[in-house]
Structure formats: C-alpha cells, structure tokens
Image (cartoon, grey):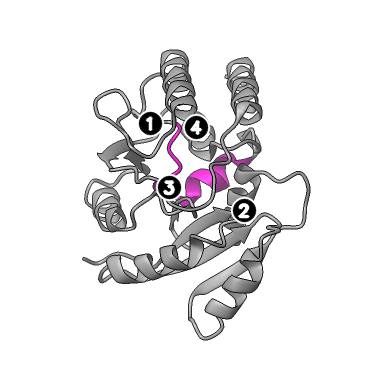
Amino acid sequence: MNFPKFTIIIPIFNEKKNIVELLKNITLKVKKLKFEIFLIDDDSTDGSQELITNYIKNKDDIYLIKRRKKPRDLSLSCIDGFKRSKKKFILVMDGDGQHDPKYINTMVRTINKNDLDIVVGSRELFSRKVQGLNFFRKISSKILILLINFLFGNKTNDPMSGFFIFKREIFLKNKNKLFSKGYKILFDLITVDKKLKIKDIEINFLKRDKGYSKMDFKIVLILFFQIISKILNN
C-alpha cells in the first residue's frame, strides 16, 4: 500500500506498566507502513519518563515529549503533538493498551482508499458487549454519545473514541475553533466542520490489565461544559 509516513500520537500519564508493551505491539502489528511515534507525557509521577527514555535510546522515530504545563489535560497533550507533527496524517491512540494496534492497518487503508478526513475506531457500544469498560464508563459514555449525536448529528457511532486517524490540515484550519481542553479530542475535531468525511471501523476495545482508568466524574463534567460551549458557538 502506497501511504505516506504518518505520526502516531499517544498521550500518557502514569502508564509505566503498559507503555513499553504497547510500543512493542505497534512495531509487531503495524505492517508495511512508515510512521513516527510521539509519546506526550503529561508529567507522569510513576517513572514512565525514565522507562521510556531508556527504551527509546536506540530506537528511530519514537520521541518522548514531556509536558510540564498545568493542569494535566489529554486534549492539550494531543494538541501539543498535532503542532509538532509535520505529516499529512495523524493517528491518536491511548497508552493503556486498550486500543489494539492491529487496527491501525485497517484505519490507514480505509482513510487512504476512500479519501476521508477522519476514520474512527468505534467501540460500537450500543450493538455489542464491550469488555474494556467498567459500569460507570459504559453508562456515562452511552449517555454522552446519545447527547452528542442528537445535538450535532450522527457523524460517527463513537464520538467519544480515543482511537482515530485524521488529516492534519483539519487541525491547522480549525485550531482556533477548538474547545482545546478535556479528554475527548475527537469530539472537538468532528464538530468544527460540518463537511468532514468520516467513517467508522468497528474495533474490539480491550480490557485494561494494568493501571487504572483516568475517567471520573470530573472528566464527565468537563465534557458537559464542552458540549455547552459547542452549542453556544455553533
């Protein structure tokens, strides 16, 4: 497949137990594609930075970017990566191992073949059982997805996904319109332009084996503020 080199952005915070295994899986499962990886560390306190620094010492195209700015914020981490990337396409995924790198091949093939703006790795929460979410995350995610798709149109079955690939030009053209904080950067991106061509691919959202989810009531509250902000500025 003739596809240009792209950037994989992985925002992380305290993922010492997961990140090296994820990097190995990406190398193992992403076939015949050229990519660079930006690990955006949001000032981890568990030794993640030291571990990553040692792991990537002799690795090409894997870069650790240390965020020192407060507050910690996943969207701001991603945006930091978007600004640094010079590639046409950017893929975003979580650092906890719940996004299986094997889907990257399909996502790249789909965006390339269909000339799309965004391809979303959709968890399909309403049509299948998802093992990787606890009860709170399942309920809150479903409520927010229904609300977002009702208010802004059903552009994707999973506007809450953290696993997607998109054209960097979308960010460059619309960066001043972004809410630019919170934990769901995909929702931010898909609502800045009504003409975006978006397609879902169904993924199996894996169960987290190590560490803990960062999703809590505070993050859900920020998402509601983000929705209100989008309505007022739409």
Which residue in the structure is indicated by mark 2? Answer: 13
Q: Is residue 114 left or right of residue 230?
A: left
Q: Mark 2 and mark 3: span between their CA atoms?
A: 15 Å
Mark 1 and mark 3 in contact (Cβ < 8 Å)? no
At a point 50% along the width and 57% down the height, the residue shown is 9
> Which numbered mark, 4 or 3, is in the foreground of this view?
3
Furthest residue toward bottom: 58
Q: Secondary structure at mark 1?
A: loop
Chain part drawn in magenta? 160-175
Q: Is residue 163 left or right of residue 64?
A: left
Query: Disc number at residue 208?
Result: 3
Q: Is residue 30 left or right of residue 169?
A: left
Q: Is residue 103 visible?
A: yes
Q: Amino acid at mark 3?
A: Arg
Q: Amino acid at mark 2?
A: Phe
Among numbered discs 4 and 3, the one appearing first in the sequence = 4
Q: Mark 1 and mark 2: span between their CA atoms?
A: 23 Å
Q: Mark 4 and mark 2: span between their CA atoms?
A: 21 Å
At a point 48% along the width and 50% down the height, the residue shown is 94
Q: Residues within 10 Å of mark 3 (few under 14, many from 20)?
A: some
Viewer-closest of 134 and 50: 134
Which residue in the structure is indicated by mark 1? Answer: 158
* Residue 200, placed above or below residue 14: above
